[in-house]
Amino acid sequence: MDWTEELDKWAKEYLPDLKMRTDEAMSRHTSFRIGGPARRMAFPGSGEQMVLLADFAGKCGARPMVIGNGTNLLVPDEGLDRLVIDTSAGLNRLETGAEENQVKAEGGVPLARLADFSHKQGLGGLEFAHGIPGTVGGAMCMNAGAYGGEMAHVVETVALLDVESGVKTLSRREMEFGYRHSILTDHPDWVVLYAVFRLTPGDPAEIRANMEALMAKRKASQPLEWPSAGSTFKRPAGHFAGTLIDQCGLKGLTVGGAQVSEKHAGFIINRGGATFADVMGLITKVQERVLAATGVRLEPEVKIVR
Ligand SMILES: Cc1cc2nc3c(=O)[nH]c(=O)nc-3n(C[C@H](O)[C@H](O)[C@H](O)COP(=O)(O)OP(=O)(O)OC[C@H]3O[C@@H](n4cnc5c(N)ncnc54)[C@H](O)[C@@H]3O)c2cc1C
């Protein structure tokens, strides 16, 4: 039996309330607006549904992949023969934590909402995250950061599901955060259920002003008007990817519908109708040209999904 038949049968019996779609276009769930159909996409509404689903999906060969807002993903046009589990619709509870200055957020909570909520509690520390368009789960995976801040500075604990051993809570140190790296980089099958943040009390007006100033900086320097996945490449040691690409004269370089942004050379944007192959082709061209001119090898930051 094909894994989709097995999964459909199981879901009907054990999770009849689970929202699931067939052949769901990934382009609707990625900020690049690129990606063909996922054979199944599920939208669990609670941690319990997630645990049951992830467990069965692993067993029936569905190769589950958990996504948040899809803001760091590049997905092939032929689609994905796997189960995509979208956390953004149903795993988004947000509350103050058990201790003072703590905030607890489920994996699908958008970072903007998390930062807004914290600011309203008079808690600072997440101003840097307000303009990052991902979710808590994606941010834990990537150790998302900007303007000198990163998740590793504000996370206290993370509750993770590992279907092999169950739910476990890892401390900040155990999360092994590094530059765009965490323990999830080496365990892509683990799922962030929720994270607890330890924040700093502050004046809400000052926190808000800080968030707005960083957002203004972002708008002035990034091509937010075009679909993209943010910075295409990681920052190579001792350099900035965008600066190297700019110095090589590659702003505006185009393959099909994909283009190196004229506004920020670190972003590849979808100028309309860009395909997976267009973006991959452009990534390769940029890597080759930068390597030849500077000797620096650029590594993609965007996750190329298969
Ligand atoms: C305009 C723009 C600006 C950006 N600016 C920044 C920036 O300033 N700094 C920065 O760091 N990034 C930035 N990004 C990239 C992106 O927003 C971050 O990497 C973000 O953390 C991804 O979150 P997501 O929810 O969209 O994750 P997705 O793209 O959905 O997934 C990314 C990875 O996380 C995994 N994942 C997602 N949710 C979970 C979960 N619950 N459990 C386990 N794994 C999970 C996925 O499997 C995948 O491997 C930007 C992107 C865009 C489009």
Image: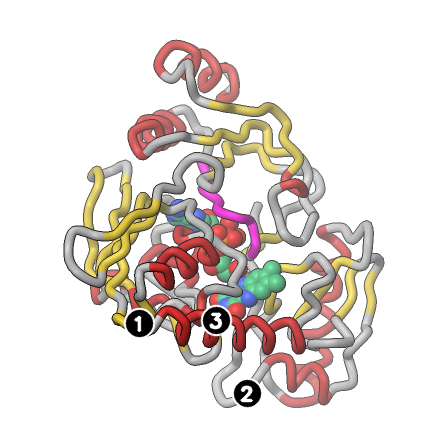
At x 38% / y 67%, what residue is drawn? 126
Q: Nearer the viewer, residue 49 or 97?
A: 97
Say if mark 3 contacts mark 1, CB within 8 Å: no
Type of the residue with mark 1: His
Asked whether mark 1 and ligand 1 are closer than 8 Å, the reply comes as no
Type of the residue with mark 3: Met
Q: Residue 84 vs residue 242: left or right?
A: left
Residue 211, horizontal then vertical, whole percent = 48, 71
User: Of helix, strand and loop, which mostly describes the magenta segment?
Assistant: loop
Type of the residue with mark 2: His
Disc 1: which residue = 153
Quick one: label 2, few (<14), some, or many (20+) residues within 10 Å?
Answer: few
Residue 174, horizontal then vertical, whole percent = 21, 62
- In the picture, residue 240 is in which quadrant? bottom right
Say if mark 3 contacts mark 2, CB within 8 Å: no
Tell me if residue 178 can be seen. Answer: yes
**Mark-to-mark CA distance, 3 and 2:** 26 Å
Quick one: label 1, few (<14), some, or many (20+) residues within 10 Å?
Answer: some
Give SS at disc 2.
loop
Segment tinted magenta in the rendering:
64-71
Mark 3 or mark 1: name the one nearer the start of the chain.
1
At x 64% / y 80%, what residue is drawn? 242
At x 27% / y 55%, what residue is drawn? 103
Check the image and report above or below for 168 versus 44.
Answer: below
Q: Which of marks 3 and 2 is in front?
A: 3
What colour scheme has been applied to the protein in the rendered image?
secondary structure
Check the image and report above or below for 95 versus 40.
Answer: below
Residue 211 badge: 3
Check the image and report above or below for 12 versus 233.
Answer: above
Disc 2: which residue = 239
